[in-house]
Image (cartoon, helix red, strand yellow):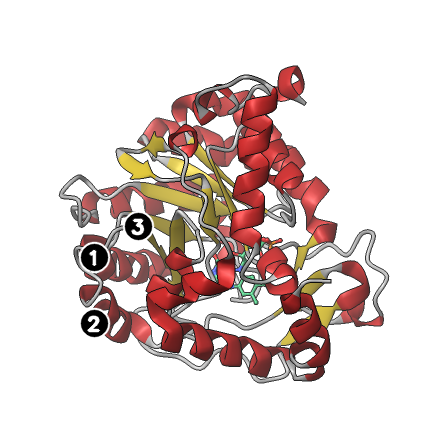
Amino acid sequence: MDLYRLVFRLVLARLDPETAHNLALRCLALLGSTAGLLAGRPVRDTRLHLERFGVPFANPLGLAAGFDKNAVAVPALLALGFGHVEVGTVTPRPQPGNPAPRLFRLLEDEALINRLGFPSEGIGAVAERLRALRGQPGVIGINVGKNRATPLERAAQDYALGLTALGPLSDYAVVNISSPNTAGLRALQQRGQLDELCAALLAARPRSRRGQPLPLLLKIAPDLTDAELDDILDVALARGLDGLVVSNTTTAREGVRSPLAGEAGGLSGAPLRARSDALLAACFARAGRRLALVGVGGVFTAEHAWRKLLAGASLVQVYTGFVYRGPALPGQILAGLQQRLERFGLSRLDDVIGAGQRLG
Ligand SMILES: Cc1cc2nc3c(=O)[nH]c(=O)nc-3n(C[C@H](O)[C@H](O)[C@H](O)COP(=O)(O)O)c2cc1C
């Protein structure tokens, strides 16, 4: 058993999940870029490079939104080997989120349920931290949301505030319209509302820290019907958005054994994998390479990441897998991707993306 699993079992799993998370984040923040020492040998390989929406990524693996909501540990997380870190969800004004307990560990399912409800220090505090990272290598995404007190009709203003304040300090932005923990938020995925929202955000879009128009992606729920997904893809393609993050957590509970399954909130981790992979494949079947797809949901191993690439993801993100497997996970996944490229005699990751059964 590796050291992290021992620490997880003996220390972290005995703490309340949110306390454990905050402790881990504080340790990472203190370590800064020396956190790389926890990760083993770094995997640097030009075959893993790829460029999407004008942004060069050293590798396809990123840390999903929600882990470092307030940008307190970005250098440490990049030093662990992630090619990008998605900060947020950030709301315009600071807000505490839902009352605790609001994060649950489903050990027997390798899953989490959360109903955090966007606790955020707000765009001011996050902007200040991102400003301090200017000029640092590594890709930083920013994931924006709306305050709980903002009525849905004024949601576009909140998202626009996030984009204009944080976009110039980051490389790409994700508009989170799929958290199950903010009342009504998922309604923004409906065609009419989404089209209006996208129009408003494209009009407000600033330049990124690279000086290009800020790449804009939508993060979608895994609980959409086929018709709802069609609407989203139509709008995203018609408006010329850069991509989709597929997917957020699910409100479904299929295949979950833990007695905590009844807790309200979004489920992530192993039980989400199949649902999220299927949605990703459906997006790729319709949009092909016209939208950059970010595959997230249930990735714990290189094989899981490989399957998302085959299904059409250009980038792959992890959250729950990182919680369960620890700081060595990015290196393990990247080494596994390297091995697979070798096995199939491929010199570029781009040849894998959407290759489906051919390289399975
Ligand atoms: C505790 C927790 C908090 C999260 N917070 C956010 C968030 O603030 N914004 C967001 O877009 N996604 C958030 N997510 C969703 C993740 O980014 C990811 O989409 C989802 O967990 C599926 O990936 P996984 O199975 O690798 O965890 C959160 C997930 C968890 C477990």
Foreground residue, 168 or 326? 326
Residue type of the residue flagged with mark 3: Gly
Q: Which residue is mark 1?
A: 169
Foreground residue, 204 or 151? 204
Mark 1 CB near ligand 1 (8 Å cut): no
Labels 2 and 3: the sequence-earlier one? 2
Q: Residues within 10 Å of mark 2 (few under 14, many from 20)?
A: few
Residue 331: x and y in percent read: 52, 49
| Mark in the foreground, 2 or 3 | 3
> In the structure shown, which secondary structural element does the residue marked by tag 2 occupy?
helix
Q: Which residue is mark 3?
A: 138
- Per the rendering, the mark at residue 128 is 2
Establish if 80 lies above or below 50: below
Residue type of the residue flagged with mark 2: Glu
Q: CA distance from mark 2 to mark 1?
A: 10 Å
Image quarter (top left, top right, bottom left or bottom right) of the C terminus:
top right
| Mark in the foreground, 3 or 1 | 3
Establish if 170 lies above or below 228: below
User: Residue visible at 82% across and 64% down?
Assistant: 108
Mark 3 CB near ligand 1 (8 Å cut): no
Residue 101: x and y in percent read: 64, 83
Q: Residues within 10 Å of mark 3 (few under 14, many from 20)?
A: some
